Image (tube, rainbow, N blue to C red):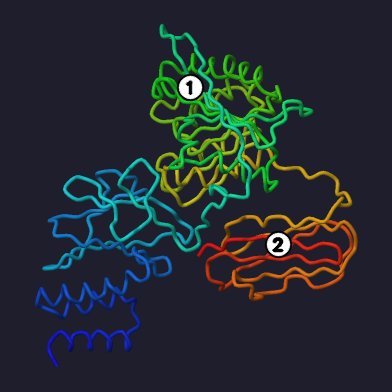
Amino acid sequence: MNLLLRVIFLMFCMQSLFPQTPFESLLATLDTVSSPPDKQSLIDSFMTQARQGSIPIINDSLVTFIHLSNADNVAIGGDFNNWSASFKRPIHHVDSTKLWYYQQVFESNARFDYAFLIEGEFVRDRENPRPATGFISTASELAMPDYVHPWEIEDIESVPDGQLETIQLEYFANGVDKTYRINTYLPAGYDSLKEGGYPVVYFQDGNGYLSPNGARAKNIIDNLVFYQEIEPVISVYVNPYNRGQEYLADHKDTYAEFFATHLTAHIDSLYNTIESPEGRLVIGPSYGGNISAYIAYQYSDIFGNCGLNSAAFRPYYDVFRLLADGPHKNIKFYAIWGTYEYPIHVDLRSLRDILLDKGYTFNWAEYPEGHNWGFWRARVDDILKYFYPYIEDEPEIPQKFVLRQNYPNPFNPNTTISYDLKQESNVSLKVYDILGREIITLVENHQDSGSYEITFSAGDLAGGVYVYRLDTEYYSGVRKMLILK
């Protein structure tokens, strides 16, 4: 038996006697091998097996990042260490091989961006197919096992689209005649004569909220409206003329005046809006949260609602102090932030406590995430559902038999199937695979007229297209659904 085979046999015996993760077994075995080619052969064999799963390797809460390189020095940076040069983690190297690795324990529902640092430049993790959507263009994304991917950001074919329009709006301020490019999005089925009008959601950093690599706000609104999680809203996406000056510094006042008086008046003149503070919501990420809070406070007679996606009040903290020390205003807040956003999460915890003590309505949520669009797009729905939840009308006897599209769709692992019965009937609801083979019976009994919904769990079913069928004495309906695995 040659040396390499003996080493592999030893590795197998050690794993049987002392339970270890496969990577720990690899490290232990490499310590017993002196030949660099044999070491690299063991590493290559391990990587072949590991790639059939996923890399980085996740064992419970322990994550192992792996990079194969001939570089002299490799480090790792990410949301979890604030991307700061003084905190980049130098990672371990196995002598005489290409293997570099780093291990850290994370929360079971964490999601973050990261990249390897090689010779002063960040590079994407070649072993990880998921690109990130944050500020580091070469970063990768890692989601822990209990992280719930946001279904509402997906472009679902069965959900009708709204209508996107563009406005050029001029405003003279600070000695400059500025032209702002404003995008507006009308919900599917927009009715210019609808009684009472529509709430309006104003987004700072509008391109980021609209972008497929950003928040995908159009998809979020379409899906939440279609599945009756929010009432239909008009959304307005505003891009600053000079972000630093207008969101944070010397032009903050004139930008707030433009936004709260000129822009809202123009939107109200074009569309069927609710022209009151409770009908307007302003949302912004990072420094966009700073200016959103400022606009809501200074113009609380126009904006009664404010959403803060990781609002950044540094370095001046003037808006923070205004909220903390100024008189109480009639504003409702909903704030989200990540624990990997130091010092933002510290500031927002403090602001929360101060405003709650002052009698504000301040709802909030904290997650193990970082400062990026991947985080914000997954939480826009929380803000919208808080301020403009769908309010169901008093139940009525259905006027017809209907089998609705399941939601969410695609899904993993749970989805809801709903249907209406115009009159009492024997009812059968079954799920089939794409070849027509019956998978499960969800309903098989007599039911009165009315509206029904049932939760279907995919369990161990493979990902792919499935069909569900409703049969009654008077009606049959079939729809497709997609399981993501």
Residue contact between numbered discs 2 and 1, judged by CB atoms under 8 Å: no
Q: Position of residue 157 (x, y in %)?
A: 58, 49
Q: Residue at x 16, y 65 (%)?
A: 98
Tell me where residue 128 sits by quadrant: bottom left
In this view, 196 is above or below 27: above
Question: On the rendered image, what quadrant is the N terminus found in?
Answer: bottom left
Tell me where residue 454 sits by quadrant: bottom right
User: Looking at the image, is mark 2 or mark 1 earlier in the sequence?
Assistant: 1
The answer for how far apart the CA atoms under marks 2 and 1 are is: 44 Å
Tell me where residue 222 sits by quadrant: top right
The residue tagged 2 is 478
In this view, 212 is above or below 31: above
The residue tagged 1 is 181
Q: Give the residue type that dot 2 points to.
A: Val
Residue 404 numbered tag = none
Q: Position of residue 422 (x, y in %)?
A: 87, 56
